[in-house]
Amino acid sequence: MVSVMTSTADPRVVAESVTDPELPMISLADLGVLRDVRIERESTVVVEITPTYTGCPAMGVMRADLVHALHEAGYPDVDVRTVLAPAWSTDWITADGRRKLLEAGIAPPAPAPVRSAGPVPLQLGQTRRTASCPLCGSADTEELSEFSATACKALRRCRSCREPFEHVKEI
Amino acid sequence: MHEETVYDALDQAHGGEGHWAFGTGFDDPLAGVDTTVPDGVDPADLGTYCLMLGDDALVLAPRLTRWVTRAPELEEEVALANVALDLLGQARLLLARAGSVGVLGRSRTLAGGTIPDEDALAYFRDPDEFRCAALVVAPNGDFAQTLVRLLAAATWRLALFSRLRDSRDPVLAAIAAKGVNELAYHRDHAGRWVLRLGDGTAESHRRAQAGVDAVWPLLADLFTATDVEARLTAAGVAVDPATVRDEVRAVLDEVLTRATLRLPDWPADVAPSGRLGRHGPELPALLGDLQGLARAHPEATW
């Protein structure tokens, strides 16, 4: 098949503009899911993405959205590849991404726990995570559930303003 | 960013011909990943080992989702569904890895040509081709027993995966590294529940202890290597399950002690059976639910 690149748009800029389907306020670049964008064999845009959680059902949508956006921008040949290593960490969420999460009422993650090579230590304490309320700023918040509507978030409540909010949990 | 629904975009990205109906089917989870088999490794052994680890997750996931709509707290339904989703993600990658090295058994013939390998393996293998341990096959029991089993299974799997990060198979090492983050979360969540139930009311303590007593015999065959695991351990790809025994026991001992539960005697090691495809009647029943629709309509799309 002969493909003709009709675009002058930078494919990296196009790919970086694609947003997360479940966190639409944040781009795949801000989320740290977009690992590389490059041109191979003169006309194929190769995009590398990494899954957040292995079971994240949004991966297929991300892939489709990237292909769609690059097609619209004039790149007919797009190859979206999965990169499994190194494993995604919430530390890869950019400062801009954290600000956008906060503005949307979602508490951004604290630094991820360091995973050393040996056994993973048991954590039975109830309050190892903390997050300030994204609505009123109070640090007096409690965890309601370690899991929430998507794989990447926990559910918390502010003891000051009483509002529940979601928290991107650190991995 | 565009006007169509995400479903239109998915369909467009895959030729607009509808999708295989019973799997996710949208993309190959290993698309773009180098699936070359490392030197000196038998592909059949590698694929079989990936089925062992994948089937543990594939079978435990639907056991956990049975609690959706009937867990004691709404938040816990969400939690168990999320744990199951992580496990299904691990199963997808591991089954796809098995398919990538050609380990498909009878499933490929039964499934027809258009179904991805991972779905063919999940929906079209017979029970004797499943390699999961008895620990994950056993029925849930009550909520306490479910959480005790999850604690044991997550502790065991985490101990294996943390070592598999150094596997000579880079795909397996990458799957393990991702899985470690998820499994640590599952284990600690289940551990906190066992603590809460064991050190709770008289009734919750009684049920947690009964759960421990029911689950403990299922630990007997977790620490004995099959021939496949022994060969792959020698090749630097797999983990000898005997090497995780002490770590698993130490973690379970700590949780039970803090939960004021009585630690039963550790069962003596026995030869593997589930890893060799030998299962009790519970697995065919579970697979009947999991596979029935896909097998009745093997070429269905939507």
Image (spheres, rainbow, N blue to C red):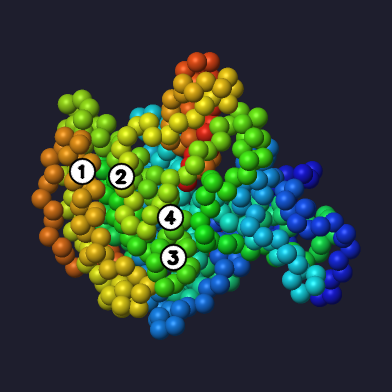
Residue on which the image places disc 4: B179
**Chain ID of residue with mark 1:** B
Residue on which the image places disc 1: B254
Q: Residue at x 58, y 26 (%)?
A: A134
Distance of mark 3 from mark 1, alpha carbons? Answer: 28 Å
Q: Residue at x 68, y 45 (%)?
A: A27
Under mark 3, the amino acid is Ala
Residue on which the image places disc 3: B173
Q: Quick check: A123 above or below B162?
A: above
Mark 4, other Cα within 10 Å: few <14 / some 14–19 / many ≥20: many
Please name whichever residue, B48 or B40, is drawn nearer the observer in this view of the structure: B40
Q: Earlier in the sequence, mark 1 or mark 4?
A: 4
Under mark 1, the amino acid is Glu
Under mark 2, the amino acid is Leu
**Chain ID of residue with mark 3:** B
Mark 2, other Cα within 10 Å: few <14 / some 14–19 / many ≥20: some
Nearer the observer: mark 1 or 4; the answer is: 1
Distance of mark 1 from mark 4, alpha carbons? Answer: 23 Å
Under mark 4, the amino acid is Gly
Q: Position of residue A91 (x, y in %)?
A: 54, 46
Q: Is residue B300 visible?
A: no
